[in-house]
Image (tube, rainbow, N blue to C red):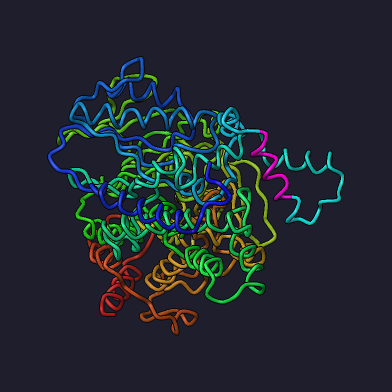
Amino acid sequence: MMSVRTTVRTILALALSLTATIAFASEWRFDDVDRVVALSDVHGAYEPMSKTLVNAGVIDEDGHWVGGETHLVITGDLLDRGPDSRLVMDLLMRLETEAEAAGGKAHLLIGNHEAMNLVGDLRYVAREEYAAFAADESADEREHWFQRDVARAGLENGDELALRARFDESHPPGFFAHRRAFAADGEYGAWLLTKPLVVVINETAFVHGGLSPLIAGMGLDGVNEGLSNDLTRYVSVFAKLQQDGVLLPGDNFYEHESIAMAFRPGLETGTETMTAINEISELRESGLHALDGPLWYRGNVYCSPLIESSRLDEALAAIGASRVVVGHSPTPNRRVLDRLDGRVLEVDTGMLSAYYSGRGHALVLEGDEVSVVSELSPEPTVPMLHPRRVGERPAPGLLAEDLERLLATGTVGEARVDAAGRNIVTVSDGTATVEALFAEKAGRGFYPDVAAYRLDRLLDLAAVPVAVVREVDGVDGSLQFLPHRWIDEQQRFDSGRGASAPCSLDLQWSTMYMFDTLIYNEGRTRQRTLYSTDAWQLVLIGHANAFSNRRGRPRHLESLSLEVDEGWRQALATLNAESLEVELGDVLDARRRRALLSRRDDLLDL
């Protein structure tokens, strides 16, 4: 246990020692590896992880390495939510040694939950995880922190039984031993602080969250040196402020800064405590904790191909990789998925079944072969393609093609008009039932919502939901899928929600403005801008006032500065008279198609 009398010199020496250890362990690029096995997001699911590794030929039934020269990569999140994270860490620590002896390697990458445990963000630690450390915790240790807790709260004269009951509830048995084990000199803290955030093996990058423009700017060394150093510094400063009586082990990470700042008025400038307070404030701004940092970024998975493709290419080029394997975001069907033409492989399949309803899966890379094994079977399969999924469906396996068939042939049932004047009907095929928006055709051979949907498919925009031509009650028109759960922009604006969207709303809005310029949409309103609330994905509906014959921009977009990035340039370049006639000829007349191509040319000239 780090004594409360630990000197500043000891803490700083420890930080320097850990920094040196990280530098010594900085092997982040590996070539000519014959076989790589990767999985992610174990979350304390020891048995499923073990079964998956057995079926992948990495360990035997007794948990010992049999993978030879295989490189095992776990892209973070061993911890939190599940009961057996300590067993998982102990296994990985042993496998590191056994793999090295056999000529292989076991790589653990820092995930957001490893970082959270190290810096004191304990929101997701299961009580069973604390209980695994209960035998390492003494009564004297608990008493020490109890007295510190009540003293800081000014409750020394309160009802002791009530105070102890409150303390024990917020600090269950094993809490302080757990915190000690994740300190900079603790059994698991010292181990984790040597781990990188990104590795590249045979030009395949492995990272927990994803590769964002932040990674493109920092490069591989910048991420693994700079952000790892930020993590080490934070852990050391956190320990220093506990020693000085400023913070307690149970203080929430998100309150560290405000608690520490409250101590500043009584401190002299230049003291070591003041320096530590200032540093903890500064470190809160590190990319380590940012939504676009490598531990938290979800854009590789959630942003549309049109938004993300060129951004990913820049990040891959910056670290010398051609594809990336990511965890962090559970796949919708709990299978390993292939996205962006194989440049993204998603391996978080919700292994902790009690929480995510998934199973363990391992990605296997051998030469040019890409396969998957699961905890249930060693028989290899191949990754599934990431489905186009605009709007939450009543069943995760309902694909865009399934929705097209359902809307085109299903039985139209109950109809209603909502408060915004939208005509909504139910459509069912006896197995699945969805809601859809009905719109009358807008002119001879003109079905604007269907045209918007098909153009979206050509561009890889992934914002316009499935729409088909359909006659309803003798009226010619179209049906467009309405997400299972949604709110419109007016409701989102009034509530202030969506700030942490997996694909930032700013990026999605910029794409909407470009699309509305291309189709000359004069009818975009807050009621025609929806969000699927499961992931804050933009869903664009109501295109009756789009596809004008005019050039230029709709009036409400004239003052906007539009940026036609490389992704848009590539997408727009694929549009031509032939492709539009083939894909949109039955729903958009020739005049409107020619006008659309003229506006495309205007955008390419920006």
- Counting from the top left corner in percent of width and height, residue 52 is at 36, 24
Image vertical order of residue 342 relative to residue 81, above or below: below
List x then y, in percent, for residue 492. 61, 62
Residue 248 drawn at (x, y percent): 63, 52
Asked whether 142 falls inside the magenta stretch, the response is yes
In the image, is 266 to the left or to the right of 392? right
Query: What residue appears at the point 75 percent right and 53 percent down from the top-left corner?
Result: 151
Direction from residue 366 to residue 153 in the image, left or right:
right
Which secondary structure type mostly characterizes the magenta part of the structure? helix
Q: Which of 508 and 467 is in front in this view?
A: 508
Can residue 54 be found in the magenta stretch? no
Q: Quadrant of residue 102?
A: top left
Q: In which quarter of the image is residue 547?
A: bottom left
Residues 108 and 210: in front is 108
Q: Which residue is drawn at 67% across and 39% down?
A: 142
Q: Is residue 459 left or right of residue 538?
A: left
Locate residue 38, reporting x and y percent.
31, 35
Location of the C terminus by quadrant is: bottom left
| Numbered-mark total | 0
Q: Residue at x 49, y 60 (%)?
A: 540
In the rendered image, the residue lying farthest to the left is: 32
- Residue 405 visible in image: no
> Residue 363, can we see it?
yes
Camera-side residue of 217 and 304: 217
Q: Which of 129 and 591 is in front in this view?
A: 129
Q: What stretch is highlighted in magenta?
A: 139-149
Choose top left, top right, bottom left or bottom right for residue 581: bottom left
